[in-house]
Amino acid sequence: MTQPTPSMDEILATFGSGTLVERMGIEFVEISAARVVGTMPVEGNTQVAGFLHGGASCVLAETLGSVGALLHVWPGGLALGTDINATHHRSVRSGTVTGVATAVALGRTLTSHEVVISDEEGRRLCTARITNYVRAAQP
């Protein structure tokens, strides 16, 4: 039986203070197993030349894909990232980026999400794919 999707507040409460999500300034806009949308500021997440750090894009992608995987096995399930890859298409120096994680596969043991990160003008900055190992809660 499918469990009801938790509220955004319930999901956000699972992260707690002091997590990387908080440090990176990631904010959730929409959450479901099939689609997770979040934003992240460029400021504070740049590399030495002043561009958005590629690792910051990967953090955003992994966060969004992992939340989608977690919701797939909610409540009480487990989701652990096993693979992430990213292609960086263009750079940005300021503003806010938006990531959209779309489920490619939601299986019994693995999930895959494609994550597209765009700038404020809607230009694609990065395309990533994350695979998570998932385990439903034990009865």
Image (cartoon, grey):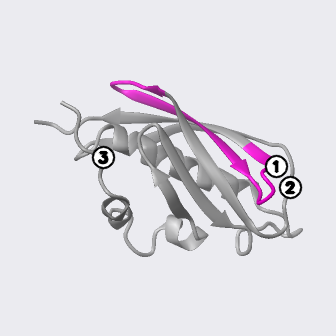
Numbered mark located on residue 91 in the image: 2
> What crowding class fits label 1: few (fewer than 14 Cα within 10 Å), some (14-19), or many (20 or more)?
some
Q: Which residue is mark 3?
A: 5
Q: Is most of the magenta stretch helix, strand or loop?
A: strand
Camera-side residue of 6 and 125: 6
Q: What is the three-letter code of the residue carrying label 1? A: Arg
Mark 1 residue element: loop
Q: Residue 38: tell me if it is visible.
A: yes
Kindly identify the amino acid type of the residue bearing the numbered disc 2.
Ser
Query: In the rendering, at what x and y percent does residue 33 appear?
Result: 41, 40
First in sequence: mark 1 or mark 2? 2
Q: Quadrant of residue 57?
A: bottom right
Mark 1 or 3, nearer chain start = 3
Q: CA distance from mark 1 to mark 2?
A: 10 Å
Secondary element under disc 3, as helix, strand or loop, is: loop
Q: Give the label on residue 123, or none.
A: 1
Residue 104 higher or lower than 118, as above or below: above
